[in-house]
Image (spheres, rainbow, N blue to C red):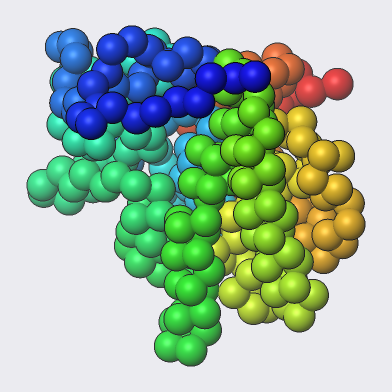
Amino acid sequence: MTKQFIPPKVWTMDSENGGQWASINRPDSGARHQQDLAVGSNPLQLYSLATPNGQKVTIMLEELLQLGVAEAEYDAYLINIGESDQFSSGFVEVNPNSKIPALIDNSGGTPIRVFESGAILLYLAEKFGQLLPKDHVKRTEVMNWLFWLQGSAPYLGGGFGHFYAYAPEKYEYPINRFTMEAKRQLDVLDKQLAKHQFLGGDEYSIADIATWPWYGNVVLNTVYEAAEFLDASSYTNLMRWAKDIEQRKGVQRGRIVNRAWGEEWEQLAERHSAADIDAILNKKP
């Protein structure tokens, strides 16, 4: 029988808690080492990694470029969170929360920092007037789902994904707890998508761009290898949506940016022009 953990009166960090991401888990914030961020020549500078949160922004930027928004050209630099790049002095200056992605907009007279993936999507949508309905009612519905995603994804990633795929030991209680919540969220999405082609209605928007890297990747079995465990194929409307969005050119291009694992044709550590992505995708068999 496992000995029951009794919390101390005052919590202290006595040792790392183990697991794949133990080295980045500490109770203090701020820079841990001095290092400036690289800066390219494009208007937008992105510092990220192709996790679901990182994919949101690179997909958004590639979708904007597909729409002909030339001003959305960007440089994307890899932030290796396993190597604590997010705790460099340069990155902390852009995002004091030390989480990817982080963006700097140098297109105006004064650089503008934008952090938190949902905030970046909204900033870009408003800046370029794309992928966010102008009609008040439609815009509100898209914002409903954008904020739903921002509040729900931590339960999928930090909850279900962590305890199912990354925790050093598997325990029944947290896996059951977060699997139940993950499946409830899948059901929420499936029912919404039974009534609409996209999350916010009949227009592709930042709500879909925010949600696909998390829930689309899960049901398509490209993160956590949990699709069978979650019975993902039973969510037929969600699966239809996930497959449809997977085929979009902007999604196929954006998902590989700042990626440093997987097949050779889906790894692009840094991106400075469209040609960088073309060269990688041309390697696809």
Task: Report the front residue among 126 and 5.
Answer: 5
Q: Is residue 126 above or below residue 163?
A: below
Rendered location of residue 96, percent (x, y) = 19, 35
- Residue drawn at x 47%, y 13% is 18
- Residue drawn at x 28%, y 27% is 8
Q: Farthest residue toward the left? A: 110
Which quadrant of the figure contains the N terminus?
top right
Task: Report the front residue among 216 and 107.
Answer: 216
Q: Quadrant of residue 285?
A: top right
Position of residue 174 in the picture relative to residue 230 (left or right): left
Position of residue 190 in the picture relative to residue 45 (left or right): right
Rendered location of residue 164, percent (x, y) = 66, 31
Position of residue 6 in the picture relative to residue 281 (left or right): left
Task: Report the front residue among 202 and 177.
Answer: 177
Q: Quadrant of residue 36?
A: top left
Rendered location of residue 124, percent (x, y) = 38, 57
Q: Is residue 136 above or below residue 177?
A: below
Q: Is residue 245 visible?
A: no
- Residue drawn at x 35%, y 66% is 126
- Residue drawn at x 60%, y 31% is 163
Rendered location of residue 235, percent (x, y) = 83, 59
Task: Report the front residue among 203 and 208.
Answer: 208
Q: Is residue 245 above or below residue 147?
A: above
Q: How many marks?
A: 0
